[in-house]
Each structure stands twice: as C-alpha cells, then as structure tokens.
Amino acid sequence: MARNPVQVFSKYNQQYGDTFRFYIGGIKEAIVTINPAVIQHVLKTNAENYHKSEIQVKRMGHFLGKGLLTTEGEAWRTQRRLIQKGFDFKQLEAFSTLLQETLADSFRKFDSQVALGPVDIYPNMMKMTFSMVARALFGARLKDDDIELVSHTISTVQEFIVRQTLQPYLNPWFGVSGQLRKHELMRVRADSILLEYIKRRRHEAPGADLLQTLMDARYSDGHGMSDELVLSESMQLLVAGHETSSNSLSWLLYLLASRPDCLEKLRLEFDSVLGGAPLRFEHVSRFEYATQIISEALRLYPPFWMIDRMAVAEDRIGDIVIPRGSTVIVYVYGTHHASLYWPDPERFDPARFTKANLSRHTPFTHIPFGGGPRGCIGGNFAMLQILMILSILLRKYDFELAPGQAIEARPMVILRPKNGIRMTFLPR
C-alpha cells in the first residue's frame, strides 16, 4: 500500500469484485468501490451523509487550515457560493490576458532549458501551472521568489500528508523525530509570506484577481472574511488549482509523443480556432477535438486517483451496508480502467469522447474531477490552463520521449509520474 495503492486496489478488484471491504494501514475500516451506482449514491444522491474523511479534514486541515477543501455543511456551502464568483465566465475571460503574460515569461525560461537537451516535463509543467494560478490569485505583484517558495512548500507538505495517511502507524515517530515540526515550520513560513501580502493588499487599489474576489465577498450579516480565512482559502486554491493541470499536461504530452496522428489533428484545430491570435477563455468551447484528447488523458491518468468520504450515519446501497463512521473510497482509477465500462481500457482512444459516444457512457464512470455538489470548482479554469499551454507548446515544438526510461504512475494525493517523464523538444 505504501509503495503503490493503485496496484493493491486493482488486484483486490479482480479478486473480490467491484466493491470490497479493506483496512487502511490495517486499522481503519474502508469500503473500496468502482461501481458507478455506489459512486453516484455517495457523491451525489446521498451526498449529505458522506463528509470528507478524517484524512482530508484532519491531515490537510492541519496544514492548510479551514477552507473549501476541509469544511462541511453550511460553512462549506457558504464558502463555495462566495468563491464560485471568482470562476464565472466573465472572470475567466478577464484572467486571459494576465495568464498569457505569465505564460510568455514561463516559456522564455522553458525555451532556454530545452535548448540544452532532454528535460523532465513534469516539474516544468508544475512551474508553469503554479505561476498561472498564483498570478490569477494574487495578481502580477507577487514576487517570483515567493511563488517558488510556496510551490516547494505545498509539494513537500503533500508528500508528508500521504505518508501520514498510508502509514498511520508511523505518526508517533513523525512527532518525536521532528518530521511533523519540520513540515509545520515550512507551512508557517509560506503562510507568513502570503498573509503579509494579503494584509498589504487591504490598503491598495483593488486588483482584478481571485484575491480581490475573496476580500470583497460578504456574508449575509455584511461581514467579510478575516485575513486568516482568506489565507486558508488562497492556499487551498493554490493546492487544488495547479497540480491537476500540470499532471494532466504531463500525461497528455507523454501520450501524444507516440501518436503523431492525434498530434497533427490537434495542431490543425488550434490553427483553425485561433489563427495567430492568443487563446482566451471565449475560445475554450470551440475546441472539440482537444476536449476529447484531454478527456481521454484524464480517463487513463485521473489526477485524483481516489476520492474518500466518511459515512455520518449508517447507510445501505443495494446489498452493501455502510457502517456509521466507516470510510468509502471511490476508486476513480479503477473505474476509469474497468473493462465493463471502457472496452480495451488501457488503449488511448480520444474517440471515446466524441459527441456520439458521450451519450453511451454510464454516469459516474468518468469522474477525473469528482462529481455531485463537491465536484471541482475550478474545472473551467483547469481547461483554460491546459489549452493555453498546449496552444503555445504544440505549435512551437516537436517532441519525443527520451530513450531508456520506464514511465510509471505514483499515486500520492495526485497521480504523479513516479520517475518523471523526460522529453526532447526541438523547434518546429
């Protein structure tokens, strides 16, 4: 489990069927499922009975504070309603120019790096997407050095949270060895940088960014969010808003490297939709083939390989009894790779997501960003990020996988490439 929970869950699915009972770390009872009817019940139909698990609320809340990712009930509904305004179509269109300027800077660095030889595409995509999220959130005034520090902190802390989750028997040792304290201090330093920036912004002219949306938000009593709550929500948006896109892009480039036919068709669509113009949010809905490509990459390599929920009260789904307090693990990767729902599931086939084929899909068998009321708030922003980067990268470079590497997925909070993905980029 500590090395690769995907292999363990997939093996048990084959042995015991689409739903089985399991003990996380040998301690915590869990029900693991790839059954779309069960998934729909947990994430949508009876979502009120299934709260985010202790793993997310306790472990992530310890490092990220109380925010959209780590709250439940009315507090969550209120925050979701307020923050949603920052992701409406008008706001995403307004972000477009800032994001393009951020990407221009990122590609200058990328160009100089790839000129020296093969690069690991994963950290490069991480840097690009994190800069885009940071600029969308904090505007153009946040320093590059601060972006770098916060990005490193988030990545390191997430790895530690995964270890706490998959190896709970080590948690006492994490405390006495100083590991817990070390990661807490990293978080405090990153928090202090962002909190200082938030306090300073309170006294500056309004900006056209997500931070302004958070600061302007008002509850029914007329009060706004405290600086500390704005910090928590900002940090959680940073966490959720960059790794999904960077992972999706990394796996997508890996898949496209062996499919020149798909690559050429994708380039033709970018030329057709954009001509020579920079991509804006208004263009997103016109990318039919690119959407198919991205959807299929997300099926094969879903960023969130599993979603966990805790049953507030006992429940029953058909013959399956869900005890109160037990954890339900929606095994997203397993559902996406189930041959019952996806013929030849390991094959990369964008045609699965043509308009004609979409109607044939069983609901809740393609859930890369979750489903139900707690589905990802930033799905449209993620699509904008991915298309913007592809619109530049694919028209600027030819690329191929560097030889002599074994590509393997590593399930952490996000499904990452275990040893990276080294690629060679040559100007077109």
Image (tube, rainbow, N blue to C red):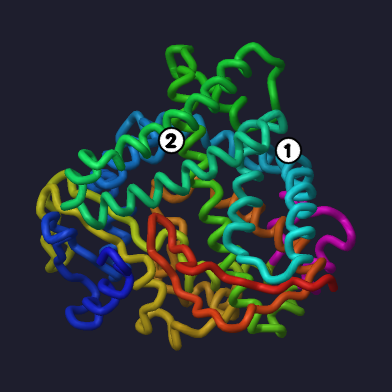
Q: Is residue 14 left or right of residue 112?
A: left
Predominant secondary structure, magenta span: helix
Q: Please name the residue shown 23% across and 65% down the image.
A: 32
The x, y position of residue 300, in whole percent, is: 48, 73
Q: Please name the residue shown 78% across and 58% down the image.
A: 112
The x, y position of residue 138, in whole percent, is: 63, 31
Instruction: Classify mark 1: helix, strand or loop.
Output: helix
Name the amino acid type tagged 2.
Answer: Met
Quarter of the image where the N terminus is located: bottom left
Question: What residue does disc 2 label?
Answer: 186
Q: Is residue 284 visible?
A: yes
Instruction: Classify mark 2: helix, strand or loop.
Output: helix
Residue 146 appears in which quarter of the rendering? top right
Residue 333 appears in which quarter of the rendering? bottom left
Q: Please name the residue shown 56% across and 74% down the image.
A: 353
Q: Is residue 281 magenta?
A: yes
